[in-house]
Image: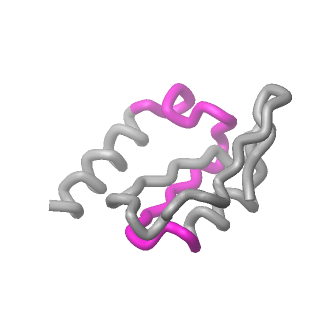
Amino acid sequence: MGIWLRNRFFNAENLDFSAFPNTLLVYGEKDHLIEKSHCFEYEMLIRKVKKVILPDAGHAPHLHDPAFVSREISKAWEAAK
């Protein structure tokens, strides 16, 4: 598993996802660089993950709706305590 980004392949197959800390996965529904299937694959691999999909956002949901992403980060931070 991996992704192509700017003509480079990033391989994620050798990562130990069980060692990942609490993770917030924010994905823009209209992202044309990273396929939605990758979002769901990582959600299944990372034990402590919360997935948030912004329906009108593209590849940079933090720029599309910074207040929403900031609130989600704050909620995830509080939940992880």
Left or right, residue 21 beside residue 81: right
From this view, report whether residue 70 is shown above or below residue 15. above
Left or right, residue 37 beside residue 21: right
**Relative to the observer, which residue lies in front, 13 or 42?**
13
Q: Quadrant of the C terminus?
A: bottom left
From this view, report whether residue 29 is shown above or below residue 39. above
Please name the residue shown 49% across and 64% down the image. Answer: 17
Please name the residue shown 38% across and 34% down the image. Answer: 67
Please name the residue shown 75% across and 61% down the image. Answer: 37
Q: Quadrant of residue 69?
A: top left
Residue 55 location in percent, x, y? 64, 49
Q: Which residues are magenta?
A: 44-66
Q: Quadrant of the N terminus?
A: bottom right
Q: Quadrant of residue 23?
A: bottom left
Residue 18 location in percent, x, y? 43, 70
From this view, report whether residue 12 is shown above or below residue 32. below
Q: How many marks?
A: 0
Extreme residue in the right direction: 7
Rendered image coloring scheme? one colour
From this view, report whether residue 62 is shown above or below residue 48. above
Indicate yes or no whether the magenta region holds residue 33: no
Residue 39 location in percent, x, y? 64, 58
Extreme residue in the front direction: 14
Indicate yes or no whether the magenta region holds residue 50: yes
Please name the residue shown 58% across and 73% down the image. Answer: 44
**Relative to the observer, which residue lies in front, 7 or 57?**
7
Extreme residue in the left direction: 81
